[in-house]
Amino acid sequence: MTNSRRKGANGEREAAKVLGESLGVTVTRMGRNGKTAEDIDHPIPGVWVEVKRPARLGWWKYKRQAFGDAGEKIPTVMMRPNDDTEWMIAVPVKRLGEFAKRILETENNDEQPQRTDHSDLHHAKYMQPARPQQTRHDT
C-alpha cells in the first residue's frame, strides 16, 4: 500500500472513530475504493460521507466528488487537514434541515436503521449502538 493510500485509510479509520463517538454509534471504515461504496459505514440513513485528510484542504474538489458519488443521498464531506486535529463536516445548506433530522433520528433510534439499498455493500457489518440509549421517565 502506498503512503497516500495508507494515509487515506488511516484518515478514514480516524474519521469513523470520531463520528461514532460523537453520535454514540459504531462507525467503521469500509475498506473499499470509495467509488462503489462510501469511505465509512454508518447508520445515518440517506447520507453519503466522503472522508478527506489532505495536506491542504481542496474543498471544491471534494465537494464535486461527494456530489458525484452520493446519488440521491445527502452529499457530505468529513475533512481535516494534516496540521489540525479538528474534523469538520460540510453539508449543502439546501439540505441542512434534512441532514439535521437524519442525525437526530440516528441518535434517538434504539435500533439501527435498516438499509434499503444494499447495492454498495457486499459484506459490511451493520452498525450496533456503541452505548445504550438512555430512556426518559415521565413524571
Image (cartoon, rainbow, N blue to C red):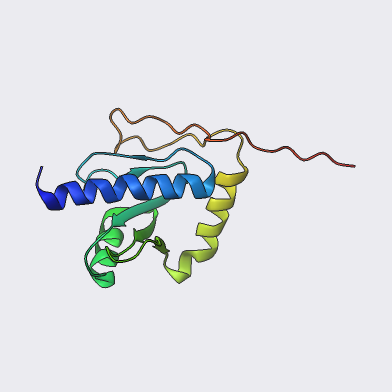
Residue at figure coordinates x 29%, y 59% from the top left: 66
x 57%, y 35%: residue: 131
- Residue 110 in percent (x, y) is at 61, 35
Residue 104 as seen in the image, left or right of residue 92: right
Which quarter of the rendering shows the C terminus?
top right
**Is there any visible trace of residue 120 in the rendered image?**
yes
Q: Position of residue 129 (x, y in %)?
A: 53, 34
Relative height, residue 61 to residue 131 (above, below): below
Please identify the residue farthest to the left as the structure is shown.
2
Nearer-the-camera pick, 58 or 82: 82
Query: Based on the displayed image, in which of its 4 quarters is residue 62 positioned?
Result: bottom left
Residue lying furthest right: 139
Q: Residue 121's x, y, as percent?
A: 30, 34
Residue 108: quarter of image: top right
Q: How many marks?
A: 0
Q: Is residue 109 above or below residue 65?
A: above
User: Who is closer to the viewer here, 83 or 78?
Assistant: 83
Is residue 133 found left or right of 100 in the rendered image? Answer: right
Residue at the image position 9 percent from the left and 47 percent from the top = 2
Q: Is residue 116 above or below residue 68?
A: above
Q: Find residue 74 and report its horizontal and vertical position in percent.
A: 41, 57
Res. 45 in view: no
Quarter of the image with the N terminus in it: top left
Residue drawn at the location 17% of the way across and 46% of the way down: 6
